[in-house]
Image (cartoon, helix red, strand yellow):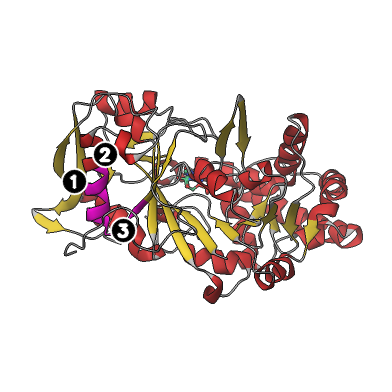
Amino acid sequence: MANVIVIGAQWGDEGKGKITDLLSRSADVVVRYQGGVNAGHTVVVKDQTFKLHLIPSGILYPNTKCIIGSGTVIDPKVLIGEIDQLAELGVSTEQLYISQTAHVTMPYHRLIDQASEEQRGEHKIGTTKRGIGPTYADKSERIGIRMVDLIDPDGLRSQVTWAVKHKNAVLEKLYNRPPLDPAAVVEEYLAYADRLRPHVIDSSLEIDKAVRDRANILFEGAQGTLLDLDHGTYPYVTSSNPISGGACVGAGVGPTIIDRVIGVAKAYTTRVGEGPFPTELEDEIGTILGDVGAEFGTTTGRPRRCGWFDAVIGRYAVRINGLDCLAITKLDVLDSLPEIKVCVAYDIDGEVCNHLPSNARQFAKCKPIYKTLPGWQQSTADCRSLADLPPTALSYLKFLAELMEVPIAIVSLGPSRDQTIIVEDPIHGPKRALLDAPQISP
Ligand code: IMP
């Protein structure tokens, strides 16, 4: 048996949906451990495209249990929409479970997120405006509403009535917005509760049972390492912990049950929202990456900022997450380029820096130091093994593995399940013996 955490190694949108979908094949249970409807992943199976925000893509396998864990925040309206969308496409959600201790995103959270972003002006974060930050803030402030409260009608009535009155003061006085009608919010959420009640469970018990049964459990992170509240590029981060450490907190398991940690990184870098991005390309190549890679947010539709692969960030992600191996996605997006650059270090005011600075103003000063590699200028979309890859594409992958000192287990060359090279089974294969990753000095 193996219990595996899959995390994003960059700023989110690394293609985790496809990788977790692939790995879910071997998983008995998939647990999403943080984030909310700010995330979005697209999974393409045969001719059907599934766009999911909260439900793990493991739902597409009929025998896989999918648990939305305690560390997530649930927007019930969006979740019910996803359940209905899956039903229309003939996918059962009978195996979908929601932690009773996950917090609920309320209408005032969304309104406050939107109003706060507007008020911040040039200091805005560029959030998804889905109420994620305010939901987590209420959790910390201990005035949040949890799934266990949502499904208790009497408790919900009194809690929501009080919370709406409290938040109306914020909406009216701080943001000059119209107040919400507490009774209408109560009625709306009582109806959501009726739909979601059958899915709500004590997820910690369920996961513990899976551990005791020696099931394969996949812990699925949303967003990415650099959006982590504690270890990301603060303040331009989300309000939860997408890193591997977040899996134990968000799922309610001890670290001793984790066998492996897999990082997903694109063959280049993207970022949505505000904040420094040293390898960003605001030129023709950036446009090519955006167009060929269809770099638009699944949740907001915003164009993603695009740039070269940044190995400083990559090494940081390896360290912070304790990565065992990497899945490199979207290699095919680089197919047409005559040369490809990789950022190997930063220049800060003339000094070489090999590490990610914690100070946001220092990070904003980082100029990438590039190593330029030849491109391959031919399609890789139909390659199904490393031997099929053009030699320069293979050299590119080896260079990334060397720089980050971790092996590459999976290479993705397009959105479909079959456009994938499994170098070695990242769950059952030998640890750290997948693709050559000679040790280099940090
Ligand atoms: P929030 O999570 O909506 O509060 O947004 C905070 C920051 O995280 C913003 O820069 C968002 O663009 C970014 N963000 C949140 N979720 C995702 C995601 O799934 N992919 C990429 N960026 C995200």
Give me the disc on residue 429.
none
Q: What residue occupies the far front of the structure in this picture? A: 387
Q: Which residue is mark 3?
A: 406
Marks 1, 2: nearer the viewer? 2
For the residue with label 3, is its CB less than 8 Å from the closest atom of ligand 1? no
SS at mark 2 in the image: loop
Which stretch is magenta? 396-408
Q: Could you tell me the amino acid type at mark 3?
A: Val
204 relative to 296 in the view: left or right: right
Residue 268 can be seen, yes or no = no
Q: Is residue 78 above or below residue 103?
A: above
Marks 1, 3: nearer the viewer? 3
Q: Which residue is mark 2?
A: 308
In this view of the protein, which residue sits in the foreground, 135 or 395? 395
Give me the disc on residue 368.
1
Verify whether residue 34 appears in magenta: no
- Of the 4 image quadrants, the one containing the N terminus is bottom right
> Where is residue 328 drawn, in percent x and y?
37, 44
Q: Are marks 2 and 3 in contact (CB under 8 Å)?
A: no
| Residue found 18% across the figure and 62% down from its top | 440
- Give the quarter of the image for residue 382: top left
Marks 2, 3: nearer the viewer? 3
For marks 1 and 3, the one nearer the N-term is 1
- Of the 4 image quadrants, the one containing the C terminus is bottom left
> Where is residue 113 drawn, in percent x and y?
58, 46
In this view of the protein, which residue sits in the foreground, 162 or 251? 251
Mark 1 Cα shell of 10 Å, populated few (<14), some (14-19), many (≥20): many
> Where is residue 353 drawn, in percent x and y?
16, 58
Q: Could you tell me the amino acid type at mark 1?
A: Pro
